[in-house]
Amino acid sequence: MIKSHTSKNNTEHTQTNYYALAGTTVKIIHKDDVLAKNIIDEFKPYAAKPQKDVDWTITLGPNIREPLLPKKAVRLALRDDDESIYKYDNKSYICKDDLFFIVVDDVNKVLDINYSRYDLRIELRTRFFIKWIFINGAEAKGLTYIHGAAVQYHGKNIVITGEAGSGKSSSMLRFVSDGAKIISDDSVLFIGDKIFPFYMKTALSPDFSKRFNMMSGALKEDLYVDMKSDIRDIDLIIFPRMWNSDTSDVRKIDYKNALLNLMHIYKREVKFNPLFDWDRVDPQAHKKLFASYSALLENARCYEFYAGFDEKEVRKKILELADEN
């Protein structure tokens, strides 16, 4: 593994690190605080040598700059947690009270993340943006994205995909608790039949410690496959659902419905993404996505998995589904 390069600027007390994944290189300029240490630790599998030309430059730190919301900026969305998203002159501005102020310039490929103090919310937003920089870069170079998790289990590559709250993380951990290795815990990247391991350390809700005998917080590095693994072919795609029932149910779905599901999940995921402007995307992007998903489904078996209330029964049934397919 290539060691990350760190340079120090004594005037601004900042450091610089470089990272590369699937042909996309980013430079992160940061202050050495808790947030930066967590992010740098997370992306160490992608550490790269210093490069003159990078795809994105990210500044990250408490009050690294003093940005202001431009006059006449238009608010596009107001999230439930009082996070506002504005647009002005091809830039996006994401603000939350006095906690953080994020500027996304996807024309010049610059991301400024400014915050008043460390908070888990700013860490989650930072991880979200860096993740999508890598995903967008990968897509521009021909890779395809699926919103979901992927595991290697008993010699099979399994993708678990669905909208937020559908049970992807729970389903993934059921396999992990039976010895599966994580290929990706949040975003699946592939091209042709090749899958790229994607290390993101998903934050888990506290109830997972009870249900899976696993500490809440981030997944541990040793649960993942080797990031240099050559992984080919997706054998099984599971669309988890949560329903009001005592027992679980498994339903095989055909090629057409699986394809429609994948397209729907993708569009929902990018709908309110400040790093994704559908109006400015290559007009052929939709056709390329359709073609990639179609090719992927030619050799994969697809099922909807409806999880009931009994965790022991749910775990048994989803593991049986994988073993039988």
Image: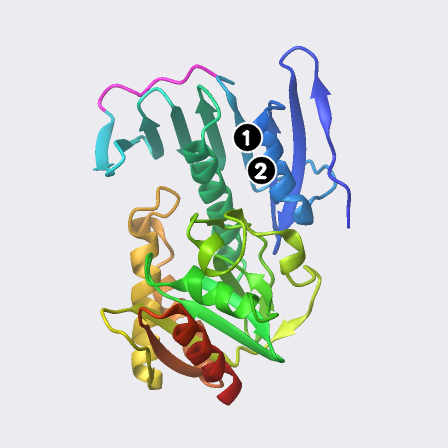
> What is the three-letter code of the residue carrying label 2?
Ile
Element carrying mark 1: helix
Q: Which mark is residue 35?
A: 1
> What is the three-letter code of the residue carrying label 1?
Leu
Place of residue 134 in the rendered image (x, y in percent of width and height, measured from the top left):
53, 49
Element carrying mark 2: helix
| Label 2–label 1 contact, CB within 8 A | yes
Magenta: main secondary structure: loop
Chain part drawn in magenta: 65-72
Closer to us: 85 or 136:
85
Residue 280, above or below 113? below
Q: Quadrant of residue 226?
A: bottom right
Display colour scheme: rainbow
In the picture, measured across the screen, residue 129 lies left or right of residue 251, that is right
Tell me the distance, in whole angstroms, between the alpha carbons under discs 2 and 1. 6 Å
In the picture, measured across the screen, residue 259 lies left or right of residue 61, that is left
Within 10 Å of disc 2 (Cα), the crowding (few <14, some 14-19, many 20+) is some
